[in-house]
Amino acid sequence: MLRVEAAEKSFDGFKAVNRANLVVEEGAIVAVIGPNGAGKTTLFNLIAGIHKPDTGKILFQGENICGLAPYDICRRGIARAFQIANIFHRLTVFENVQVSVLSQQRKSGVLFRPAQNLAVEETNSILASTGLLNKARRVAGTLSHGDQRILEMAIALGSQPRLLILDEPTAGMSPEETTVTMELVKHLSQARGLTILFCEHDMDIVFSVAQSIMVMQHGQTIIQGEPEEVRQNEQVQEAYLGGALSLSKETSDA
């Protein structure tokens, strides 16, 4: 579904992404990991169209999407959720998702009172699938941090993506919220046939959820493979200062 080939991006002479490669198969859950500053978020920004790569290709369903505007990439089927919840705090949960659905349907110019009865079924379906239907009338800014992150996923689903990109989806969450969120990610992948690409610092989450893992360091791809292959790779172990201990089965199963 998605292929990144030798992508590069520099900022003021600093090469944030350096000939990075990534493959995301349709229907898979793929993680990108690496130390702080490895280039993960910049790579996601390249895929989402926020930045344009200096060189290389980004192919989505066979089409080179480099240079397309973020809204064009979104309409082709790629949705992005950010490290910090990006929601409309003063709108209700329902309205947050409804805005996204109407935008995808190109009806966003009819907000809000005339649009109150539009896309109701589609919006409620998304809220139900993310566990937010019983909070539909709540003002989004009053939700817990965990529910705000889930709401951002629901907003992303409003654009009817085929590929959902999640940038540290459990950042700042309690252990309970983390469990609920990652179970939701797996459920969305299975129930909606979503392909999911995410980055995460918690290795327990990565190795328990991802089917394929790509590791970055200094903007480069060290390896991409199945979790056990990545766990045993010496370069990966060296990239994480704890070495083999930090990626051992004992640690990930604790």
Image (cartoon, grey):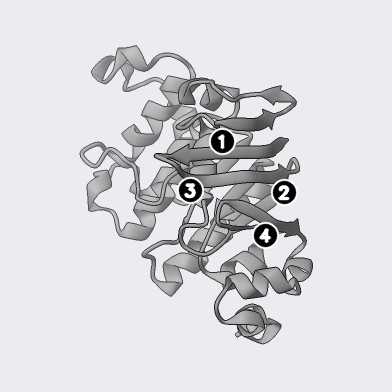
Q: Earlier in the sequence, mark 4 or mark 2?
A: 2
Q: Quote the CA–CA distance across marks 1 and 4.
A: 19 Å
Which one is nearer the viewer's eye here, 254 or 134?
254
Which secondary structure, mark 1?
helix
Q: Amino acid at mark 1?
A: Ile
Residue assigned mark 2: 28
Q: Residue at x 66, y 87 (%)?
A: 250
Horizontal side, residue 191 vs residue 232: left or right:
left
Q: Which mark is residue 41?
A: 3
Which one is nearer the viewer's eye here, 44 or 61?
44
Foreground tag (1 vs 2): 1
Which one is nearer the viewer's eye here, 226 or 136?
226
Q: Residue at x 73, y 67 (%)?
A: 230
| Image x and y of residue 24, in percent | 71, 44
Q: Which mark is residue 47?
A: 1
Q: Which mark is residue 210?
A: 4
Horizontal side, residue 196 vs residue 48: left or right:
right
Residue 43, quarter of the rendered image: top right
Q: Earlier in the sequence, mark 3 or mark 2?
A: 2
Which secondary structure, mark 4?
loop
Look at the image and tell me in which quarter the N terminus lies.
top right
Q: Earlier in the sequence, mark 1 or mark 2?
A: 2
Q: Quote the CA–CA distance across marks 3 and 2.
A: 20 Å
Q: Quote the CA–CA distance across marks 4 and 2.
A: 8 Å
Q: Earlier in the sequence, mark 4 or mark 3?
A: 3
Query: Is there a contact, CB below 8 Å, between mark 3 and mark 2?
Result: no
Q: Residue at x 36, y 64 (%)?
A: 172
Foreground tag (3 vs 2): 3
Which secondary structure, mark 2?
loop
Q: Amino acid at mark 4?
A: Ala
